[in-house]
Amino acid sequence: MDSELVDNISALIDAGQRPMVSNIIADLHAADIAVLLQHLAREPADIFFRWLSPEVGAEVLPELDDSFRLQLLADLHTDRISAFLDEMDSDDAADVLAELPEEIASEVLPALDDAESIEVLLRYEEDTAGGIMGTEYVAVPEAWTVEDATEEVRRKAEVVEPIYSVFVLDGQQRVVGSVSLKRLLLSQAGVRIADVVDIDPVTVETGVDQEEVARVMERYDLVSLPVVDSAGVLLGRITIDDVVDVLREEAEEDFQRMSGVSGGEEPRDSVLTISRGRIPWLLVGLAGAGMAALVIAQFEDQLREATILASFIPIVMAMAGNAGIQSSAIAVQGLASGEVWPSDLIPRLFKEGAVATLNGLILAVILGLAVVAILGGGDNAVRLAATASLSLVLVIIMATTIGAMIPLLFHRIGVDPAIATGPFIMMTNDILGTLVFFLLATAIYL
């Protein structure tokens, strides 16, 4: 987004030039308008948002950060909020409504045109298939003809957008298959829809986690996924744009947690909110560093006797952290994509152990040769090189094993494996790596 455009819009808002602002944004995509809004100061942003038509505002709202969207809506009259929500898909409207304060939501919901469907969606957990599905879809009985189904598509074209396929139902409203629009258009009008339907449809129940929904759609290359109840009755659908949002949200959350942030941090959050999300993990890191310092303090005499050992502490701690982060990141990624299962724990550890041994030996040889080259020959240099090299091999093997094992164990007990990466892995490896280094230094070098 061009900063000059932001400045121009701000100036026009200050001057009250609503028609000119409307002309400028007329050709902008909703996502671009959302970016523009989020770069405006608070007061101009409020005015700009109030100037948007219900149709445009309904497209912009889902593109905004959650906290910023709530700030904009909090100052609006409930009638205005209802006008926006009435123009939105049911799943997006339910998401926005769920974020509003209870007293505002209770006033807005009864005024909505599709209040009944949205109220049903609000009963589902927001990170499940039921929570992200929409209730707009095209479904026809299997006894209908292609012509009947085509007319149904035309009839619902304004309500259901986009339409990827038509779901086919049996007499009990259970999904028996689907027909793509392409096949529908290429089939003869008088043919029964049951004769052109793709049977054995992929479906998910309402309680399935949204990450599993994303994996299902990716695995089977789906653009529209029917959501059913335990009896197979069609309740809604999930479209590819919903899944893209899920993948982005989950990736952002995992990345933040791997970086030592609680997850869900947004650019416009207050300083206090951001600090509250980060400080717990910084405290964990501080505790880990403190424990590593206590380990080093136990070897004070050895350090006094051979101060050169202190120069290797950063190397050991850095390599332990890097190796642990690498293996844990791959484990977390594999668990998130479904390519790694908890039952893969033992094979995964063996593989990571082999990788760690190979990498450790390569780095140990390089470090050992560097120590000898810098300090020259002699028994003292050789013993120091042996201490550093062997420590490096053991630390990398240990850190890689811990990095691969902890996420798998966390996943098995139902804890988000992304939490295992970052401060937790770094703390463990710093403490154990430092301990291993000084034990070997005491045995070999001193």
Image: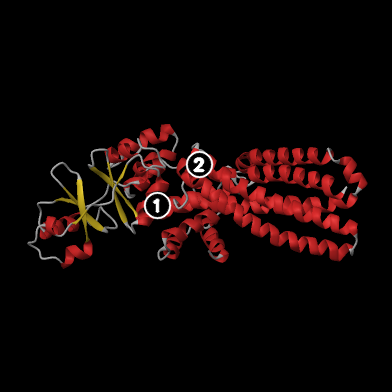
| Observer able to see residue 268 | no
Q: Amino acid at mark 1?
A: Arg
**415, 331: nearer the viewer:** 331
Say few, some or many: other residues with alpha carbon within 10 Å of mark 1 (under 14 / 14 to 19 / 20 or more). Answer: some
Of badges 2 and 1, the one in the foreground is: 2
Q: Is residue 414 above or below residue 26?
A: above
Q: Amino acid at mark 2?
A: His
Tell me which residue sits at (15%, 46%) in the image. 170
Q: Is residue 52 above or below residue 300?
A: below
Local secondary structure at mark 1: helix
Q: Position of residue 407 (x, y in %)?
A: 55, 44
| Observer able to see residue 283 | yes
Say few, some or many: other residues with alpha carbon within 10 Å of mark 2 (under 14 / 14 to 19 / 20 or more). Answer: some
Residue 215 is tagged as 1
Residue 411 is tagged as 2
Q: Position of residue 142 (x, y in %)?
A: 13, 51
Name the side, left or right, on which 137 lies relative to 148.
right
Q: Label 2 vs label 1: CA separation?
A: 17 Å
Within the image, what quadrant is residue 270 found in? Answer: top right
Tell me which residue sits at (42%, 59%) in the image. 30
**220, 352: nearer the viewer:** 352
In this view, the residue farthest toward the bottom is 186
Name the side, left or right, on which 185 lies relative to 134.
left
Residue 2 is tagged as none
Q: Position of residue 320 (x, y in %)?
A: 69, 50
Local secondary structure at mark 2: helix
